[in-house]
Amino acid sequence: MSVLAERVCRTIERHRLLPAGARVLAAVSGGADSTALVWLLRDGAARLGIQLAGLAHVNHMLRGASSDADEQFCREMAERLALPFETCREDVRAAARGWGTSVEDAGRRVRYEFLAGAMSRVGASHVAVGHTRDDQAETLLLNLLRGAGTTGLGGMPACRGTIVRPLLDCRHEELVEWLRAAGVPFREDESNLDRRYLRNRVRHDVLPALARAVPSAGAALARAAEITRADGEYLESLAADALVRVCREAGTGRSILDAEALAAMPEALARRVAHLAMRRRAGGRFVGFEQAERLVALARGQMKGPMKLPGQRAALAERGQLWLDSLPGRGVREGELPSSSGTFFRAPLSIPGEALLDDGRAVSSELRPGGFTAMGLDAPDLDARTALLDADLLADLAVRFRRPGDRFRPLGLRGHKSLQDFFVDRKVPRRERERTPIVVDRDDRIAWVAGHAVSEDFRVSERTRAVVILKLRGERV
């Protein structure tokens, strides 16, 4: 195994990006980064215990014959490796006009929608994308120029749900050198040289200037992004806990916040709480720093209401209440979210330990060394209120209730399924759906739908060295 492949394996292991047994769909453009991603994953597959499930490519139809040649190159690479090939053609420029957004944003939306379907078709558990340390540095600088907070300055996470970035510790230039030394061809995208795009100006002008002044600038920016992301995630967890205390739902159309409590919070926390509350009513619209500041200012009496915010209207009401009302045609649909404060409930679950729910129940965890056969569990221990998970695949567990967009891979299922569809198929009553405890890991991936199903991503297998036993205890009060 090459030194570079060894480093990629260490990145995957350090961030726990791909559990043993993972089937990985590689997103490829034909460029050096994504081409190197494919071959490096192939080289490290045996060590990691993973399998390349296929290659996926989106033809954005932006560069005519060059775009078609990229698609053909990726197809031939898949054939050379005897891997399934998934592709789609989408006029991204037309899509951007129709959606009223930039070509870059439209392309990103098209790619990730396509990749979700491609995963299911090839039976993949994860999608690997070829973002590098250079991409991370560019993203941080771009977000800094846009005035982003810690979330934006945290750059791209190594893992977001099923999307993983194994090359974040690699520089683009060393990937190019590695490919050339190995005799592996790749495509050059001429649009990457077009300085009409801000990212290209940052890539070709700003970052080289920084590197001339400080040779380690790229590495320092990437490291700063990782540190900032960790800080931001901690503050977000504090904000989620605070939101439970200061916000309640009055049906599906209104959130009621304690204005005095929100106003008294430290600025960094208040903005995040306001942001989380507004996202609940935004109906998918973007909620930014400026809107969060305005809501906090309203709570503190520094601005007058009512005020219009993304997908909602905010106003101070009697008894120190701050109302957020979904505007007609915006916000959540009936039944999309629970009406109780459980929407925002999130309790950490240590191993071993116990997470107390807000209705009298608890989820407990216990660690037992050895594989499944060494645990000595009796049949009565293995009821629907008990789950067995692979300890090596778990980190920073928490318990919450369902949220919009929740998806997971029920045990034995090749593809992913929305939690809503899972509940409907199981004929779970609506009221029970809203209060079913969901155990998630640090990346908010569902590990156990308590009383119903374990996720295939965390299952006990012959490779398991230690097992976490989860139990749902008590009855609702």
Image (cartoon, rainbow, N blue to C red):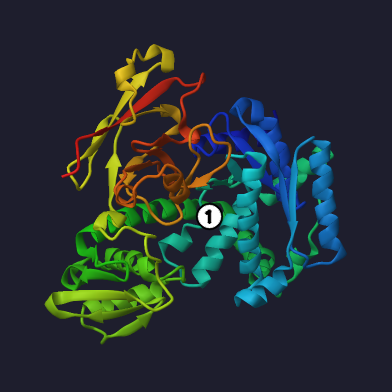
Lateral position of residue 192 relative to residue 223, left or right: right
Q: Secondary structure at mark 1?
A: loop
Q: Is residue 64 above or below residue 374?
A: below
Q: Quadrant of the C terminus?
A: top left
Is 24 left or right of 278, judged from the image as shown?
right
Which of these two is toward me, 182 or 330? 330
Instruction: State the residue position of label 1.
Output: 156
Q: Is residue 131 in view from this perspective?
A: no
Counting from the top left corner in percent of width and height, residue 167 is at 62, 45
Is 13 rendered above or below residue 332?
A: above
Picture coordinates of residue 225, whole percent (x, y): 48, 55
Query: Which residue is rendered at x = 47% and y = 54% of the image?
Result: 224
Name the residue type under label 1. Met
Which image quadrant for residue 99? bottom right
Vertical order, 105 against 419 (above or below)? below
Q: Residue furthest left?
A: 319
From this viewpoint, is residue 426 visible?
Answer: yes
From the viewer's perspective, tell me whether residue 19 is left or right of residue 95. Answer: left
The residue sitting at 26% across, 60% down in the picture is 243
In the image, 183: left or right of 467?
right
Name the residue located 39 percent from the left edge and 60 percent from the top edge. Answer: 336
Viewport quadrant of the N terminus: top right
